[in-house]
Image (cartoon, rainbow, N blue to C red):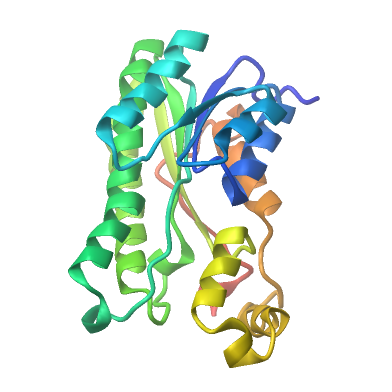
Amino acid sequence: MGERLRGRAIVVTGAGSGIGRVAAEAFAAEGADLVLADVEGVETVAKETGGIGVTADVTDEEQVARMAAAALEAFGRIDGLYANAGIDGAGRAHELSHATWSRVLDVNLTGTWLSIRAVLPAMLAAGGGSIVTQASSAALAGVPDLAAYSAAKGGVTALTRQIAVDYGREGIRANALCPGTVWTPLVERTYAERGGDATFGSMDAMRERAARGYPLGRLGTPAEIAAFALFLLSDESSWISGGVFAADGGYTAR
């Protein structure tokens, strides 16, 4: 067991699978007290990490408020937020339905804002805290067929910078992580929906093709992104705020 988050109450959204789940495990290993939120699967992760699971949709204001209230009831404070919840949404601008556009922005951008808004009063009362948002390399460079997703994640980076500016004097830091493609159940499902076996012969072939687009020659892992989030939540990053950090195997450096 480590000590980097010992005594810190950390809220993680999208904690039921993928990067959120791995992050919850990493934070627990460093001593964090956890409140874990997701639309499904979160109770299993909470049991494994010793955290508190809250079934919550980040687009629902009341459910997000209940998430923050659970942290305050259990721990009396909120020291950190990893706003990780998000969904994919493929399509060029003219191909997207209004419903798809709205849903992608609602989860990825409005859901991030609602999560931040819910924890800020507790952080202000405590005299500080650290907020880490999950943006994307799609916020930093054009990625084909991701108009709504790119717009939403671009909004996340701008919101994160604004939070850093507005609340820095109160001791609250905010930073955005911008991962490239990280192999998670969500990404695998998305690839399958976009063609998978029929287009590339196998899911492995599709994955290898995606990896060739990265200077490091491979996709990222959930553990690599979780480690970065842990650093930004810890005191090791105490003078870092307003940052937008690419964690993408060199993708946006091309």
Residue 189 visible at all: yes
Q: Taking 45 as reference, is 114 left or right? A: left
Q: Position of residue 171 (x, y in %)?
A: 40, 23
- Please determine whether, in this image, residue 246 is positioned above or below residue 126: below
Q: Extreme left residue here? A: 98
- Please determine whether, in this image, residue 221 is positioned above or below residue 12: below
Number of disc labels: 0
- Please determine whether, in this image, residue 83 is positioned above or below residue 27: below
Q: Position of residue 223 (x, y in %)?
A: 70, 50
> Quadrant where the N terminus lies?
top right
Q: Taking 141 as reference, is 208 left or right? A: right
Q: Which residue appears at 42% of the width and 73% of the height?
A: 141
The image quarter containing residue 198 is bottom right
Q: Position of residue 42 (x, y in %)?
A: 56, 35
> Quadrant where the C terminus lies?
bottom right
Q: Taking 178 as reference, is 66 left or right? A: left
Q: Nearer the viewer, residue 196 or 215?
A: 196
Q: Which residue appears at 38% of the width and 17% of the height?
A: 69
The image quarter containing residue 47 is top right
Q: Which residue appears at 46% of the width and 61% of the height?
A: 136
Q: Extreme right residue here? A: 1
Q: Taking 153 as reference, is 166 left or right? A: left
Q: Nearer the viewer, residue 26 or 204?
A: 204
The image quarter containing residue 197 is bottom right
Q: Nearer the viewer, residue 124 or 89?
A: 89
- Please determine whether, in this image, residue 113 is positioned above or below residue 95: above
